[in-house]
Amino acid sequence: METSLPLVLAGRRGQAQRLVALNAAATALGLVPGLGLADAQARFPALRVLPEDPAADGHLLEALADRAERWTPLVALDAPDGLLLDITGCAHLFGGEAALATAIRRHVAGLGFSVRVAVAGTVGCAWALARYGRQAMVAAGAEAALLAPLPLACLRLAGETVAGLAEAGLETVGDLIARPRAPLAARYGAGLLRRLDQALGAVDEPISPRRPVADHLVERRLAEPVSLETQVLGLIECLGDSLGAGLEAEGRGATRLEASLFRVDGVQRRLAVGAGRPLRRGAEIARLFAERLAGAGEDWDAGFGFDLIRLAAVETARLAPEQPDLEAGAGVAAEAAFDLLLDRLGARLGPDRLRRPAAADRHHPERAAALVPAGVTPAGAPPPEQDSRIPARPYRLLARPEPVEAMAEVPDGPPRRFRWRGRLHEVARAEGPERIAPEWWRTGGDGPTRDYFRVETAEGARLWLYRAGLFGQETERPSWYLHGFFL
Amino acid sequence: MNINAMNLHDLLRRRIARIEGRGEYSLPADPGLRTPALAAFGLSALDEVLGGGLAAGTLHEVAGPAGAGLCLRLAPAARPLFWLGTEAGFATAGLPHAPGLEGLGLDLRRLFCLVLPRAEDVLWAAEEALRCRAVGAVLVELPGPGKAADLTATRRLSLAARDGGGFAFLVRHQATAEPSAAATRWTVAPVPGPVDGFGGLGETALDLTLTKNRRGPCGRWTITWRRDDRRFTLATPADPAAVPLRRAG
């Protein structure tokens, strides 16, 4: 976009359209955020105006937060235009706080943003310095001195509070620090002092990271970026082993794992896999990720390669330390192999593809028995006992009953011949009807009453047909459907 | 009527299992429960030709939509059973229906179904399942002649079955003359079954044609499935006109 021409974003604030954001050229004209759009256009008719798009801004901030996770897993959004990074224990990996701040500044500026970075011992102080300060680094205890000359807006206060304080002659943080606290609290509420204390470090303020932080997390930074899938999987295996060692020490195994791959250009790619059985062996973990990659079918876009790989156990479960048993060894191995098979099928084909039959207490055949994803029913739970008076049921059921043209006796005789999938079938023998009434106690009806017949055709095929609707009561022309197969 | 007896048997079997304290099934059974080496029809005429029954660790190929039912009846109990197929195949032949499967004598707790969009995925998943030693049987079902299961694919399935030691069944909805690495190849077609004494549907009858057999001669048999005691019998040719169409129920 042309940067030399004045451009503003406008949005509705209260009853009026106001300027929300301006580029450098527009600022140079003397425009400020908050000015009425009509005023601005009256002064500069050639001004380019675009509507604001808070959703797009949010996505952009999220994308930046993704990139920021390469420096620390604890990243919080500070909408609309800030990111809070908890770099406790991370800075030394990048050569200290100053070097980290420089790296962040260079990276984000390289993306085309104007960025201000501040490192401080408190969220409030860093927030204030990033927006209003000159100095980017604060030593512990020096907060008060640095904040004193800054305007009160740097304390994250509401606009009217700042205006009220200005009327009382309080302009800077220093003015506020010098005042007795009790009258301030009485006049402007406890929120003011809380913000002040947060900035000065008298009150602790944790950041709330946008994604839950895993208890167990390992990562590897690579001097030379890798781009091949096999290399990445090899690294995941190594990381999985060290992750597993940490988990084993606590007697736990990972049931949900997430791998974050950071590309050299900062784009982050996340892969998640679930496991039915707690895992802590790198080879098993790497195999799940291999299936996940193969099943996704996306193109493997490594760009110029990945230079940081992080593996986190997002969910863990209790897993006793392994102690091979001489007697039951084969059984345990078989059980582990079976769980691994289910995990791999789930990782490659999607967790909902693997299905198991589940019974429900319903009358309609298609509702009484359904296939549900394997994870839904706890494996090994016995299905409810079948009613022994229910006649034989087909072992295959069409997902949607197929209409057939049938010739049958009225009012409720079995079909004599019927046309299905373009072929005429003669009925040699039939049993029925088995009448299944709609579940009237449920709204959103199941259609009319069904009379089911077990039918053997002249060729020997055994089919399950039903007539929808009672002749003379529900309909004058009952329709016929084929629903299942006995053979 | 025997239709009720079937479910009554089920009920009693399950009650007895519960009383004996083996009602709760855990996957996959204890190590003592090995997959049997043979799946026998229980008919000397067939089993002798097959060398005792269909062998585990090899691929058996069945043509005809009724093939799935045959394989489910033959698959040994006590180990997980995978039933895989394409969406198109299950759409024409029907999805597994639990109450009916119980009638075949299948323990639903060991049944795992996979319905996948592409035949290639089905074959991949089947190979994976066959390689796992804890899986008892894998039933792959492909619509039409199942072109995806060519000589290479069937050989891969055979090798996977040999590694895992389970039973491998490949069901094609239509017979094909394409070469296959299967140890036995069958064609299954339903035939009119014998009538029961009340004019209703009697036992299910199937016409089996063995077209390839590595261990012995080929042949053709008509067998019936007895629902009450869940076993096959050799059928005497039935005359469908013997009993007129009557209602029963």
Image (cartoon, coloured by chain):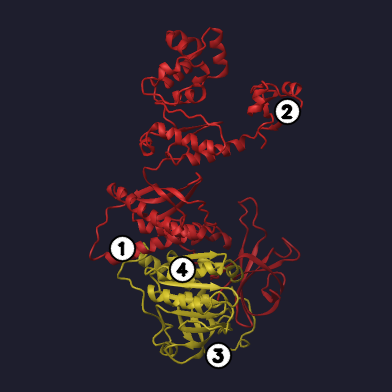
Chain colours: A red, B yellow
Structural crowding at the residue carrying mark 4, measured as other residues with C-alpha within 10 Å and reported as few (<14), some (14–19) or many (≥20): many
Same chain assignment for discs 3 and 1: no
Q: Which residue is mark 3?
A: B237
Q: Tell me the element at label 1.
A: helix
Residue B32 image position (x, y, % from top left): 30, 70
Q: Label 1 is placed on what type of residue?
A: Val
Q: Tell me the element at label 3.
A: loop
- Marks 3/1: CA–CA distance: 50 Å
- Marks 3/2: CA–CA distance: 94 Å
Residue A388 image position (x, y, % from top left): 48, 66
Residue sitting at 32 percent across and 64 percent down? A333
Q: Tell me the element at label 2.
A: loop
- Marks 3/4: CA–CA distance: 34 Å
Q: Which residue is mark 4?
A: B82
Q: Please give the chain letter of the residue carrying mark 4.
A: B
Q: Label 3 is placed on what type of residue?
A: Pro
User: Decide: marks 4, 1 in contact (CB < 8 A)?
Assistant: no
Q: Which residue is mark 2?
A: A47
- Which numbered mark, 2 or 1, is in the foreground of this view? 2
Residue sitting at 68 percent across and 22 percent down? A29
